[in-house]
Amino acid sequence: MARFLNDRKEITGKMPGSLIHLGLKRTEKTRLRMIRFSTDELIESEPGRLEDCLSSISENSVTWINIDGLNDEKMISELGELFNIHAILLEDMLDTGQRPKFAETDDLLVVILKVLNYDEKSKKLSSEQISMILDDSFLITLQEEEGTYFDHIRERIRKGNGRARRKKADYLTYLLLDTIVDNYLLNIEILGSIIEKTESRIFASKPQKGLMEEVYKHKTEINFLRKNIRPVKEIVHHLIENESGFIADDNLKYFRDLNDLVMQASETIEIYQMMLNDQLNIYHASLDSKANEIMKVLTIFSAFFIPLSFVAGVYGMNFDNLPELHFKYGYLYFWLVILTITLSLVFYFRKRRWF
């Protein structure tokens, strides 16, 4: 399966809105969890069916329904029927290679985006798709697998700390989005630290084997980050500018702060992209410089041996009447000439600062 795009053979030729899960099967059984809370009450349960959640939805409280696992296409179809979600949106939620997106209907806001995870062993980033369906009194989240990303938010709701129990579903949406963006910054920090450490190795006197492959691998991971994070700017912008009333005016300041974090993440990615490009350029320039140094040394040696070879060649010819051939001190003079030529070249090269 291509890393930047899911295999779409199963859905090719199907009608738009066909509910087919595209991606890795991460759970054997879909898990349904629900939290209903207000200032005065908290109810947690794991309903057997989605239909059982409808009775818990009330204007005086917030109901958070979480679905772990996208394998049960029947449940996803039921989700669309119960909450009036268009099949096209459900299809996007089941496609785990879907580009992060924002959609709005008359009744709901839908946000689809990724949570990222850096594997220390493989040194690769992986992603998990998170979908959010927001109404005034409820929030539905769909995850590929059961994760711990939002456990601290559940704990805050249980303890009644902070604003979570006093606010509506839009604030809960902000808390989840804030957690995801913090996850982005954490992964950027991990990858950025690795990229910065690579820089010192590039300037080493002797190029290290496999260094270029590492830099190219870092570029791939940065591009993967960029692919999944860049569209989130659009999503947060739509949430801030949205005039449908799903986001309360007194909560807009939180989304604006979230927008600043997304901008920071996006700008940091661009900086590391430029750093990697610079590292590649410096690496190639360093190799070229070292090759030039080698060629310079070889050229200097050849410059010494060209006149010496000429002199030796002349007096090595087999002619009977060659001048000085039978001279008593000819061998001594030959070496004096060789030494004079060598010293003259050394003096000349030193004066020109060629070595």
Image: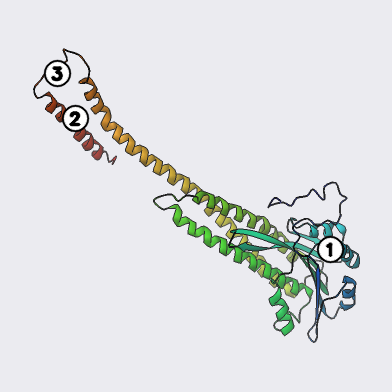
Residue pointed to by mark 1: 72
* Rendering quarter of residue 187: bottom right
Q: Amino acid at mark 3?
A: Leu
Q: Among all residues in the image, which is located at the extreme top? A: 321
Q: Amino acid at mark 1?
A: Asp
In terms of sequence position, does the residue under pointer 3 or pointer 2 come before the other?
Answer: 3
Q: Are marks 3 and 2 in contact (CB under 8 Å)?
A: no
Residue at position x 30%, y 32% from top?
A: 302
- The residue that label 3 is drawn on is 325
Name the residue beneath numbered marker 2: 338
Is 296 left, or right, of 197 in this rendering?
Answer: left
**Tag shown at residue 188:** none
Indicate the amino acid at tag 2: Ile
- Where is residue 232? Give x, y as percent: 70, 61
Is disc 3 surrounded by few (<14), some (14 to 19) or many (20+) residues within 10 Å? some
Q: Position of residue 271 (x, y in %)?
A: 55, 57
Dot 2 or dot 1, earlier in sequence? 1
Q: Secondary structure at mark 2?
A: helix
Closer-to-camera residue (40/341)? 341
Kindly state the secondary structure of the residue where label 3 is placed. Answer: loop
2 and 1 marks in contact (CB < 8 Å): no
